[in-house]
Image: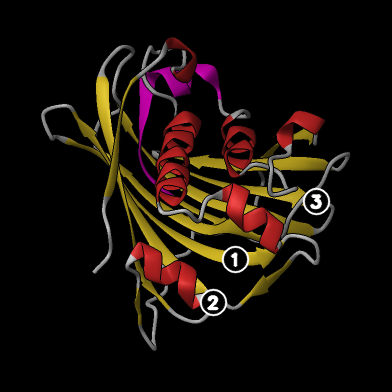
Amino acid sequence: MAHEYEIKRPVEDYATDLTGKLSLPMMMNLAILSSTLQSNVLGIGPSVMRPRGYGWVILQYDITINRRPEMDEVIRIQTTVGHNNSFLARRGFKILSEEGEVLCDIVSLWAMIDIHKRRMIRLPEDILAKYGSEAVKHLPGMDNPAKIEADEDFETRSYRVRYLDIDGNQHVNNTKYIEWMLDPLDPDFMESHEVSHVKLRYENEVHLGHTINSEVILDGNTSRHRIMLGDTVSAEAEIEWRKN
């Protein structure tokens, strides 16, 4: 049976945006923090994995946001590693109010890579056993985000990958992609709307010194995004919004 792990944190001011609420990138960061702390407690954290040449990477997110917590609000972040097959594992997160209200529900798909060769490897059974993950023959797929088609007009903005965008797994931190995706949107739209649902899929890594393009189409209360390195898609997202 999958082991549940929980942390409790106040929403600090540095984790909020102009609205005074927990930002989407920081929401994702706190979820990842809970997974790292669980791994540390189980004795399979980054300090153990890196000497073995292993690193976890996120392939896909499906995020449902009911309410973003506000600055100084105490939240609980719960996580479990669910089913896995030979190469992929699902991890779930819930962000709760202190009283137990479900603020955010996250499903994520993970793989493990050889951090030197930068390629996927078979998931080690000894590590999965510590999480209590259950192996299945067929791991159901996750819904992909709607794509920006070649003949559509989109807004675009360029960014250079900086040194501080790179994390300990030697690749661009996954929350940087969502920052690049949201940045071209009009600030007035961002302040007057709330994210309600995100489908995010990572395709190809970008590296230090690369220049990427963040492309976006806003159609009513849905935005479609992609991060491009030349003609190569690095990440895609579909975001649903609701008016404040």
Observer-nearest of 231 and 77: 77
- Residue at point 70% right, 56% down? 51
Q: Position of residue 7 (x, y in %)?
A: 31, 35
Q: Is residue 146 magenta?
A: no
- Residue at point 51% right, 62% down? 110
Pointer 2: residues within 10 angstroms few (<14), some, or many (20+)?
Answer: some
Determine whether the residue tagged by mark 3 lies in a helix, strand or loop.
strand
Q: Which mark is residue 229?
A: 3
Nearer the N terminus, badge 1 or badge 2? 2
Nearer the N terminus, badge 1 or badge 3? 1
Q: Are marks 1 and 2 in contact (CB under 8 Å)?
A: yes
- Residue at point 45% right, 51% down? 39
Of the residues shown, which amino acid type is indicated by label 3? Leu
Is residue 148 at all visible to an observer of this figure? no
Observer-nearest of 45 and 157: 45
Observer-nearest of 32 and 22: 32
Q: Position of residue 221 (x, y in %)?
A: 39, 38
Q: Position of residue 193 (x, y in %)?
A: 37, 26
- Residue 54 position by quadrant: bottom right
Between marks 2 and 3, how big is the CA–CA gap?
A: 26 Å
- Residue at point 38% right, 19% down? 192
Pointer 1: residues within 10 angstroms few (<14), some, or many (20+)?
Answer: many
Q: Which mark is residue 87?
A: 2
